[in-house]
Image (cartoon, coloured by chain):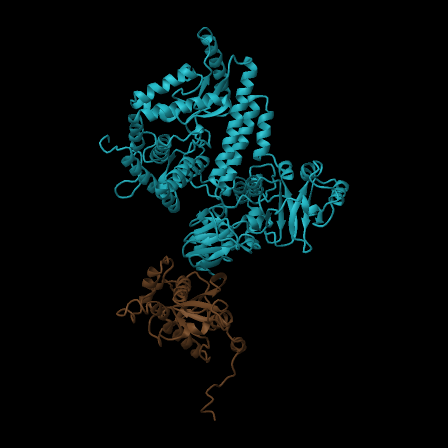
Amino acid sequence: MKNTIAERVADFLKGYPPFSFMGQGELREVAAQVKVIYCEKGKTIFWKGDHRHEHFFMVHKGAVNLLSNDKSHELFAILDTCDEGDVFGLRPLVAGQNYVLTAKASEESIIYGIPIDVFKPIAEKNIQVGYFLVESFASNTRNPYATSHRGHLYSSAVPTSNERDNLFELQPAKIIKNVMTAERSDSIRSVAKKMNSKQIGSIIIVDPDHHPIGIVTDKDFRNKVVTGKSLITDKIEKIMSSPVICYPKGITLAQAQMAMVKHKIGHLCITKDGTPKSRLAGIISEHDLVVSQGNNPAVLIKAIQRAEKTKDLKEIRKKVMLLLNGYMQQNIPMTHISKIITELNDATIKKVIEISVEKLGTPLCNFAWMCLGSQGRKEQLLHTDQDNALVFEDVEEAKHKETKAYFLALSQHVTRRLNKVGYEYCPAEMMASNPKWCLSLSEWKAQFTEWVTNPGEEEILLSTIFFDFDISYGDISLTLALSDHIFEMTDRHKRFLAMLGVNALKNASPLGFFRQFIVERDGNHKDFFDLKRRALMPLTDAGRLLILSKQVKHINNTAERFEKLAELEPENAEVYMNCSYAAKALLKFRTKQGLQNNDSGRYIALEKLSKQEKIKLKRTFKAIDQVQDLVKVRFQLQHLL
Amino acid sequence: MKLFNKRQRPLPDFWKSYEKSFRKKLPDTITDNRFVALDTETTGFDLKKDRVLCIGAVSVLNNVIDLNDSLELYLHQDTFNPKTVEIHGIIQEEQFEQISAIEAIQEFLAYLKNAVIVAHHAYFDITMINNMLARHDLPMLKNKVLDTGVLHQRTRLRTNLIEQQKVVSLDALAKQLNIPLKDRHTASGDAYITAIAFLKLVHRLRERGLPNKLRRLFWKL
């Protein structure tokens, strides 16, 4: 029988992979079985955790959001938006699992439901279709051939057959189901015996309903019993740690880790509904997490510390990037991500310096290795340039030359190694290997004094880079002395702050008169939006200026600076908190862009952004406008601009 | 007594099984009910003289149009009106597999069963089909009928007093509801557009407080 509608559906399917690889006959076979589904705005197509349907889906008209939440959680993060021609909900059907994401129509939509029973045999027969599926699952993108749109078809929380790949971090954490338990009234001695006979390091204390109420680990015996604080005849509840942190089943490795870091604990209890008021279903221990996976932060830090060669560090660095990618997909808060990644960066730099010091012999005096700019602000998530400097103790005049020569040689070693690991050289030579930036403490002080008292355009530019220094190795008293010096100088020279203010306002609002994005007019990046210059820099500059004027030490991160400012000036707290949020959002944006396009994420092709992303960007610009106004008024810059 | 019993011959089996399907009560809710959106292409617009050339139908159940449960019948008719060919493009002796009217009726009734019919300007299509049934000594369709034109009026009830009574064409309706006008003027294409329009209209009515009760869909203006 002729089926006009099915033919039209086939025509539509043909325009998009994997159907574009199918023959006319195969397509018709599939199309005739399609279910056309009408979804009103906000309609849920499937929930995370739902049993898989018999169909996977393709958006025909409208748009569908893929969300991270399940039925019981209202809070969600939009992981991806599927537009016309995008396929979703396929992987669970192929892998035989429940849905790992929630799909919701973000507008009134018409969706095709394609029966897996019809599709699967064709996919198995048709090599190209098979390749497409394998590739899109492996690369975790909806369409591996379209580099322009690398959406994520499936949440990375799906275990894949290749357990060592980059998705591993986001698999469900392994739960130990056979948990040893004891009751609160049991004696310490009997519990210890039980643990000893089972060779376990921890035990969960439960109430008669089998709800977890506490945990006892080897450490508790060490700290509370052996020290004599408790007697072995006492009840176990006396030494248990309580309450326990509970989560529901299905928590991912990353989530479990974050929870442990957050609560500073080594064990999570898994209960039926995720609260302590339900039956204990299992536990997750930090030890098992670490053992079960290769690239978690703790393991990576250890690997960095154990590394002996630059080559090892390079390998580890690749894993760090995978970890970052995973965190971004999992939508873990930016502050956590940047802390972890910065720690890993720091550890790498430390290790490189250690290796170099070993090669060159013990330094002649104390020194500190400083990272500058984005690394100093802990905002460097992707590979960016290495901006660094070195400060060494003041030594006798006679020894100065020799000392400086040593540190220059050391710096050259370090920068070369860092370059091998994956940190690009700074094109402006702002590196410790440059004799200008490898100075003794008093030389640095003199340099800073010069910039602050005589601020021209170049001096301001240098200040914005060097004043965001952070120690990554060495003697902290040296960098503290430098901070003090900067505060003293800037306090005395108000003109300098005004100049910094002018600099902060140099890049005016990223939105034009008609609320459109201002794009680059010429050069290699014509018609691209310069995220760094137009959005990140104005915010960073304003944060630095304001925190300098408040003489706050040790806070380099822009988001944290604004949080501190909100605390110091409650009357402007709203503006500052907006800025703090904007700083995080922009950094995340840049990182995402960078990961997607495998570059620094600085230049953004606006047409590739979704509407939602644009709205998000514009929202951060509002904060920039607000803080620029504030700076203008506070430092009386109207006449200087 | 013959006067009251006009029927000469007993009803055929396919009609009996069609009738039988009505013994089952329709579900209470809109979402549980099977709707059949249909459209006919005819040799012309004269209800008596013209004939059905094509019946296209798709079923709707719980917001889903199942293409596997659709119907597309091309009828062989001796009546032929060159004027309407321009509109529907169906020329007799074309390549499609054509069946006789009685075969079409059998297939159609077996497909339709007790579903609620949805059509745009339903009166025309239903009358054409009923006339066809009558020519084959069969009673009229027993199905309940919903007209998307009327449903559309109900969605505008409170919005525009002047245009309230205006009945729009399928083209205008599709445009208003943002439905792409592909395959317009093929029976199946129009049936599909009608089905989508029906789903969107029901949603709009539901947003205005229509409960998920099938009988409420039949309430008059």
Image vertical order of residue A379 relative to residue B84, above or below: above
The image position of residue B9, as x and y in percent, is 50, 84
Q: Which of B25 and A392 lies nearest the eye of the viewer?
A: A392
Which chain shows up in cyan? A
The residue nearer to you, when weighing B200 against B104, is B200
- Residue A316 percent across, percent down from the top left: 56, 29
Instruction: Give A185 or B176, whichever is nearer the viewer.
Output: A185
Number of marks in picture:
0
Q: Is residue A122 visible?
A: yes
Place residue A567 in its image quadrant.
top left
In x, y percent, where is residue A557?
A: 43, 33
Among the chains pictured, the one given brown colouring is B
Q: Residue furthest left?
A: A639
Which one is nearer the viewer's eye here, A431 or A220?
A220
Q: Furthest-top residue in view?
A: A398
What residue sits 56% from the left and 49% below the top?
A92
On the image, the x and y values in percent for residue A308 come to 59, 21
Q: Is residue A453 above or below residue B188?
A: above
Locate the C terminus of chain A and report the quarter of the image it occupies.
top left
**Residue at 33% across, 21% down:** A451
Question: From what the image shows, is residue B168 above or below residue A77?
Answer: below
Q: As drawn, is A316 to the left or to the right of A478?
A: right
> In this image, A204 relative to A401: left or right?
right
Instruction: Locate residue B147: give its quadrant.
Output: bottom left
Is residue A518 visible in this depiction of the protein?
no
